[in-house]
């Protein structure tokens, strides 16, 4: 059984969704980031950058335990382990990796900054931060909407990939980003399609904190 060290965050939800979709047994080990538990020595031995999520798989390569940190790395590891949600063919795999990196590098850090500045006291610094990062977040949603035109999933046909799980973890907070789907019909349809999957829904329902 995989140990999932996490908290109720978009990055944590990416992994709970993936584990449910892949049918892998796991148990949640909450890391309360409101109490700085991410700095505990045991967690740092698993995730040296003191960020959630991280996993320990007791049945890793060669039957030996392995720990993995960084949500993108965890998704790639789980896809390789199960042979699911990432194509084996290199040409087909490239779009999955591209859109996974797109999420990791932009569609996560940018809305995360929106979250941060919206919680700041009223004033010029808050206004500037919200304006800057909200504009970039909206741009990224637009990129996603154009990508999804005529497509059911972001990078693959027939079924989602780990890129969809990664992006969904952050799109789940679109209301908090103050980005409605009214002008993003393709994103809205994709979001509803993903959330209608029983395993994905369970991944969002499981208690992470």
Image (cartoon, grey):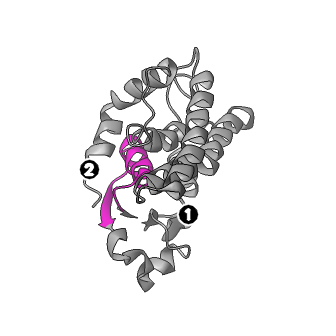
Q: Position of residue 142 (x, y in %)?
A: 59, 28
**Disc 2 designates what residue?**
206
Dot 1, how many residues are within 10 Å of its Cα: few (below 14), some (14-19), or many (20+)?
few
Residue drawn 47% across the image and 55% down it: 117
Return the residue nearer the eye: 99 or 19.
Answer: 99
In the rendered image, the residue lying farthest to the bottom is 41
In the rendered image, the residue lying farthest to the front is 123
**Disc 1 designates what residue?**
61
Q: Position of residue 160 (x, y in %)?
A: 50, 31
Q: Quadrant of residue 147?
A: top right
Return the residue nearer the eye: 205 or 105.
Answer: 105
* Residue range corresponding to the magenta coloring: 7-29
Find out whether residue 107 is within the magenta segment.
no
Vertical placement of residue 79 versus 182, above or below: below
| Cα separation between marks 1 and 2 | 27 Å
Residue drawn 42% across the image and 75% down it: 38
């Amino acid at each position: 059984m995989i140990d999932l060290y996490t908290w109720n965050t978009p990055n944590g939800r990416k992994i709970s969704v993936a584990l449910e979709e892949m049918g892998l047994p796991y148990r949640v080990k909450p890391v309360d980031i409101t109490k700085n538990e991410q700095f505990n020595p045991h967690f740092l031995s698993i995730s040296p950058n003191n960020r959630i999520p991280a996993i320990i798989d007791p049945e890793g390569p060669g039957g030996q335990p392995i720990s993995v940190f960084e949500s993108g790395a965890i998704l790639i590891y789980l896809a390789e382990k199960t042979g699911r949600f990432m194509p084996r063919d290199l040409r087909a795999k490239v779009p999955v990796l591209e859109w996974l990196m797109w999420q990791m590098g932009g569609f996560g850090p940018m809305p995360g900054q929106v979250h941060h500045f919206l919680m700041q006291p009223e004033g010029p610094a808050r206004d500037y931060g919200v304006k800057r990062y909200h504009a970039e977040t909206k741009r990224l949603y637009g990129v996603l909407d154009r990508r999804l035109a005529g497509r059911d999933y972001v990078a693959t046909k027939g079924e989602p990939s780990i890129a969809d799980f990664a992006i969904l973890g952050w799109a789940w907070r679109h209301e908090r980003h103050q980005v409605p789907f009214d002008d993003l019909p393709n994103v809205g349809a994709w979001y509803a399609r993903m959330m209608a999957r029983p395993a994905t829904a369970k991944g969002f329902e499981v208690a992470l904190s």
